[in-house]
């Protein structure tokens, strides 16, 4: 097993690292100031300026196939890039990506939705979660009733990322109530591509962090049959494909933040003097730093192993669940330790630690809670789909 990066891989990572240090990190205080005023931390025009700057250097669509103008990089490189981007809490992402299930669109839908999303002229959101259907996605109640050549959608979705900004939604609705009652979800749910101007509405949900999800409402929203993504009744498989598209990328971004926070903690500990000595000399502080370093290294290899398995064409779902679970739990432990190292200053909004504290808590909930990841990991082991010996066997 080769654990080294190629020269090209190092160059790509170094470019992103430099970009984050020179262009993104200098914006942090402005972002914190805006957020304290209740404003959007990174205004849309500033976000676009950064994306355009990155694109000028060829960084566009990290995982997007080259045929659509993207870089078509490996999953491993995508993870390494996400780690570097995660070293700043500024909510910046490179442009040129589209939801993976949009590649299942027909030619007309690709022209109307996929390509404009990649180019950034359209914004999408993914809507399956409902007030009564979170971890149990099979419990969705939003319905789509066929009326002639059209479908009429009714229901409510909640905690939808990007739902307030999106101009179209990938919404999942029950199209065969009888099969749905029988538990035949794989035959009863359909995905629809629905423009906002077709009638659905959204409003923001306030949260403890800066994440601004939305609640979406569909009241007799009429869409043509051409709005179906994929096949009627086959939407649940698309939903699972979307959810499992890259759970390793979420803990990868958290990993970058944890690296930065521990570096901040060490710098503070070297300079903060109590009782005549830097607190870095205190065993309690040293142990928090040591435990955090071990957690970071373990998470790094869980993330990179999951990404490597994706690149090898292996079934990486077990590895991704492990990375997501470990990252959610231990990233929260790390930010808690580093806030403790900083004492009262860590609790203020002068430093980004309390912001990271609120943001990282979400990692244990969205795109599969800790409990769902544990359930998945245990079931795979107990049913023989995975081994405690890992992918090496």
Image (cartoon, helix red, strand yellow):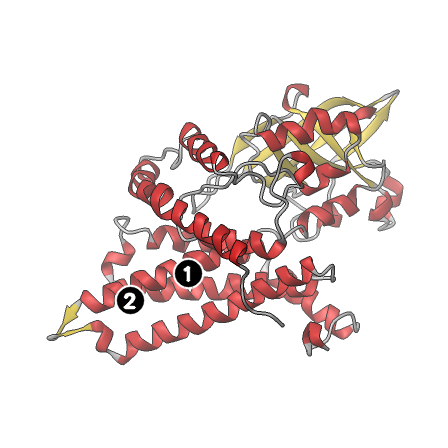
Most foreground residue, 177 or 93: 93
| Residue at (41, 71) in percent of width and height | 293
Which residue position is annotated with label 2? 266
Residue 381 at what x, y percent from top left?
73, 73
Residue at the farthest front position:
7
Considering the image in quadrants, where does the N terminus appear? Answer: bottom right
Q: Quadrant of residue 312?
A: bottom right
Q: Quadrant of residue 256?
A: bottom left
Residue at the farthest left position:
276
Which residue position is annotated with label 1? 258
Most foreground residue, 274 or 11: 11
Q: Secondary structure at mark 2?
A: helix
Badge 2 crowding class, 10 Å Cα cut-off, few under 14, some 14 to 19, many 20 or more, is: many
- Asked whether the viewer can see residue 253, the reply is no
Label 1 vs 2, first from the N-terminus: 1
Q: Secondary structure at mark 1?
A: helix
| Residue at (81, 36) in percent of width and height | 230
The image shows residue 226, relative to residue 53, as above or below, that is: above
Q: Indicate left or right for 208 with 369 as reference.
A: left
Residue 121 at what x, y percent from top left?
58, 25
């Amino acid at each position: 097993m080769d654990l080294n990066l190629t020269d090209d891989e190092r160059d790509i990572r170094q470019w992103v690292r430099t970009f984050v240090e020179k262009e993104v990190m200098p914006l942090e205080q402005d972002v914190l100031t805006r957020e304290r005023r209740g404003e959007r931390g990174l205004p849309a025009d500033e976000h676009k300026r950064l994306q355009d700057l990155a694109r000028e250097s060829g960084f566009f669509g990290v995982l997007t196939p080259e045929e659509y103008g993207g870089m078509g990089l490996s999953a491993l490189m995508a993870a390494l890039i996400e780690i570097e981007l995660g070293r700043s809490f500024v909510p910046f992402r490179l442009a040129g990506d589209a939801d993976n299930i949009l590649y299942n669109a027909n030619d007309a839908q690709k022209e109307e939705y996929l390509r404009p999303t990649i180019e950034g002229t359209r914004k999408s959101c993914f809507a399956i979660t409902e007030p009564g259907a979170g971890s149990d996605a099979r419990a969705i109640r939003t319905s789509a009733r066929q009326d002639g050549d059209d479908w009429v959608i009714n229901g409510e979705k909640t905690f939808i990322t990007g739902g307030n900004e999106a101009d179209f939604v990938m919404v999942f609705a029950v199209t065969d109530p009888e099969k749905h009652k029988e538990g035949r979800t794989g035959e009863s749910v359909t995905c629809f591509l629905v423009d906002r101007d077709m009638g659905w509405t959204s409003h923001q949900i306030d949260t403890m962090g800066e994440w601004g999800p939305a609640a979406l409402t569909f009241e007799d929203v009429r869409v043509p049959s051409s709005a179906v993504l994929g096949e009627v009744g086959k939407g649940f498989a698309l939903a699972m494909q979307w959810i499992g598209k890259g759970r390793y990328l979420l803990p990868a971004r958290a990993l970058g933040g944890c690296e930065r926070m521990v570096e901040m903690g060490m710098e503070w500990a070297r300079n903060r003097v109590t009782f005549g000595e830097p607190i870095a000399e205190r065993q309690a502080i040293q142990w928090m730093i040591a435990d955090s370093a071990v957690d970071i290294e373990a998470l790094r290899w869980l993330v990179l192993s999951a990404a490597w398995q994706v690149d090898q064409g292996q079934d990486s779902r077990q590895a991704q669940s492990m990375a997501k679970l470990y990252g959610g739990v231990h990233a929260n432990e790390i930010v808690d330790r580093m806030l403790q190292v900083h004492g009262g200053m860590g609790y203020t909004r002068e430093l980004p630690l309390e912001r990271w504290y609120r943001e990282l808590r979400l990692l244990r909930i969205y795109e599969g809670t800790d409990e769902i990841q544990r359930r998945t990991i245990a079931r795979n082991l107990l049913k023989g789909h995975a081994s405690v010996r890992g992918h090496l066997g």
